[in-house]
Amino acid sequence: MTAPIYLDNNGTTPHDPAVIEAMRPFLETEFGNPSSSHWYGIIPKKAVKIARGQVAKVLDCKPEEILFTSGGTESNNHAIRGVAHTYKNKGNHIITSSIEHPAVTEVCNSLEKDGFSTTYLPVDQFGMVNTADVKEAIRPETILITIMHANNEVGTIQPIAEISEIAKNNGIIMHTDAAQSIGKIPSAVSSLGVDLLSVTGHKIYGPKGIGALYIKNKLEVEKLFYGANQESGLRAGTENVLEMAGLGKACEIAADNLEKNIKHMKKLTDRLYQGLTDQINEIRLNGHMEKRLPNTLSVSFKNLEANRILEEIGLEVAASAGAACHSDRVEISHVLKAMNVPLEWAKGTIRFSAGRMNSLSEIEKAIRVVTDAVLKLKI
């Protein structure tokens, strides 16, 4: 049986063949510890250095400002908890948005048990944070603003550079979760103006279980792990050379092919949206029409259930739902709730996220499959 067309790249991405090749030596021959002083540690140590430089290149920062982690969740945890505990004598207030990933909201929730308070900013109908709300939420005790660069469900891109400027003018540290934006839109920290930025490998055609955290030079952040002196003393433990090499290569490819990939993915999602709207009347776009990730298309089908649509298309198209319908209740994603998407629309929400490995012919087939399923369910 032919595998379904994969349109869930915001969930995870396949490995780029070049990433696999970059990792291969550290599976087959180069097993040494990069902290070793002998011959076997030379190539692994060099690989870690190269990978750090490759990640720094895609973010336009210094290699020494890159801290390797186990993924985006750890990066977010380290950034938020690290800042909170380091600067708790200055204040205990954090500002975030109502559409963040659980890797941010759950961290904030846990800190509230330790005496911190969090303001969850609203978003408009497009999923956009208003910078005026950011200014209004600031208190004398505010120490951190953490707002995602681009939303994983609807793709809306936040005005991070403007928010960073507000933070800077008020002496507040700024963090952004950029898990979804690396390789899809420009994400240079020099342009965004952030103090901390989270990266994850498996969203950019790299391996799972590896990520990075950009920490602006000279910014103090509490250690995550205690032990030896790896990762500038902030994250003890023998380096995961295999996956660091993979993440580095993935970032190098993302940096070198950014404009090409943006154009390709936008062409695919534009065609998918046009094809669906040409044949389906009751369809709604979620997220900003223009300020949206080029690969992300969240659409709602009125009075249908997302899980039923996915059941119909599952053997031919892989996508994800924005709502889960049960016999006694409907679970709408917190993002759609925050955007005030009406229930009759929200419950039928599907997210299609294209990738650079998708083709236009796959999109044409997806249009046919999804259209047939929706029209069938409407009967």
Image (spheres, helix red, strand yellow):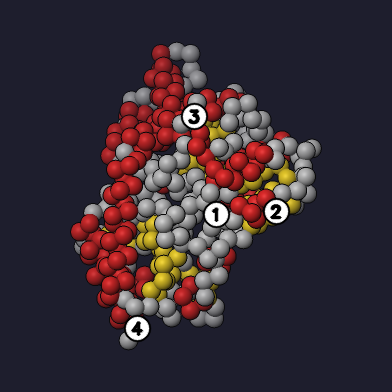
Q: Is residue 120 left or right of residue 261?
A: right
**Pointer 4 residue:** 378
Secondary-structure class at tag 1: loop
**Pointer 3 residue:** 61
Name the N-terminal-most of marks 3 and 2: 3
| Marks 2 & 1, CB-CB < 8 Å contact | no
Q: CA distance from mark 2 to mark 1?
A: 23 Å
Q: CA distance from mark 1 to mark 3?
A: 25 Å
| Marks 3 & 4, CB-CB < 8 Å contact | no
Q: CA distance from mark 3 to mark 2?
A: 31 Å
Secondary-structure class at tag 2: helix
Tag 3: amino acid: Cys
Secondary-structure class at tag 4: helix
Residue depicted at x 63% and y 26%: 218
Residue depicted at x 22% and y 63%: 364
Assess disc 1: are there few (<14), some (14-19) or many (≥20) residues with their C-alpha within 10 Å of its C-alpha.
many
Q: Position of residue 103 (x, y in %)?
A: 57, 50
Q: Position of residue 120 (x, y in %)?
A: 65, 57
Q: CA distance from mark 4 to mark 1?
A: 32 Å
Q: CA distance from mark 2 to mark 4?
A: 45 Å
Q: Is residue 208 left or right of residue 99?
A: left
Q: Is residue 20 left or right of residue 89?
A: left
**Pointer 1 residue:** 101
Badge nearest the viewer, 2 or 4: 2
**Pointer 2 residue:** 136
Q: Which residue is at the front of the view, 305 or 276?
A: 276
Name the N-terminal-most of marks 3 and 4: 3
- Most extreme residue toward the bottom is 379
Name the N-terminal-most of marks 2 and 1: 1
Q: Is residue 271 above or below residue 169?
A: below
Badge nearest the viewer, 2 or 1: 2
Tag 4: amino acid: Lys
